[in-house]
Amino acid sequence: MMGSVLWFDALRRDVLTFISSARVRDAGRHVKAICTDRTRSLVRLTNKGFSPVVVPFGALLRLGPLEISMHP
């Protein structure tokens, strides 16, 4: 979506990003991140300070005109 506030698996650390997997390169360096509890737990193994917004599987998250939900 053009002009969206949300990036997916962004390489830049200064944007709001959805992290799809703990395997994403440098996932724990993001200061504005969204992920599932499972991903947060895995990322925290290497970065204790990782503090994303956690969205449970199946829950709907609204960000302006965007509606996203998490699925395994």
Image (cartoon, helix red, strand yellow):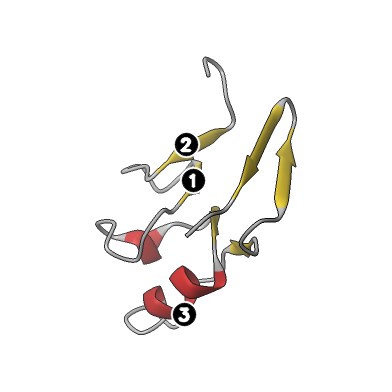
Please state the horizontal and vertical placement of residue 63, each as a whole percent of the image: 71, 37
Residues marked 1 and 2 touching at CB (< 8 Å): yes
- Position of residue 17 relative to residue 20, above or below, is above
Residues marked 2 and 3 touching at CB (< 8 Å): no
Q: Residue at left 31%, top 43%?
A: 11
Front-lying residue, 54 or 28: 54
Please state the horizontal and vertical placement of residue 37, each as a whole percent of the image: 55, 72
Work out which residue is located at the far top of the displayed protein and give it. Answer: 2
Please state the horizontal and vertical placement of residue 36, each as a whole percent of the image: 54, 64
Circle 3 residue: 41
Q: Label 2 vs label 3: CA separation?
A: 21 Å
Q: Residue at left 34%, top 66%?
A: 22
- Position of residue 54 relative to residue 64, above or below, is below
15 with respect to 27 (left or right): right
- Of pointers 1 and 2, the one earlier in the residue sequence: 2
| Amino acid type of the residue tagged 3 in the rendering | Ser
Q: How many circles with numbers are drawn on the protein?
A: 3
Circle 2 residue: 7
Please state the horizontal and vertical placement of residue 12, each as a whole percent of the image: 36, 42
55 with respect to 12 (left or right): right
| Amino acid type of the residue tagged 1 in the rendering | Thr
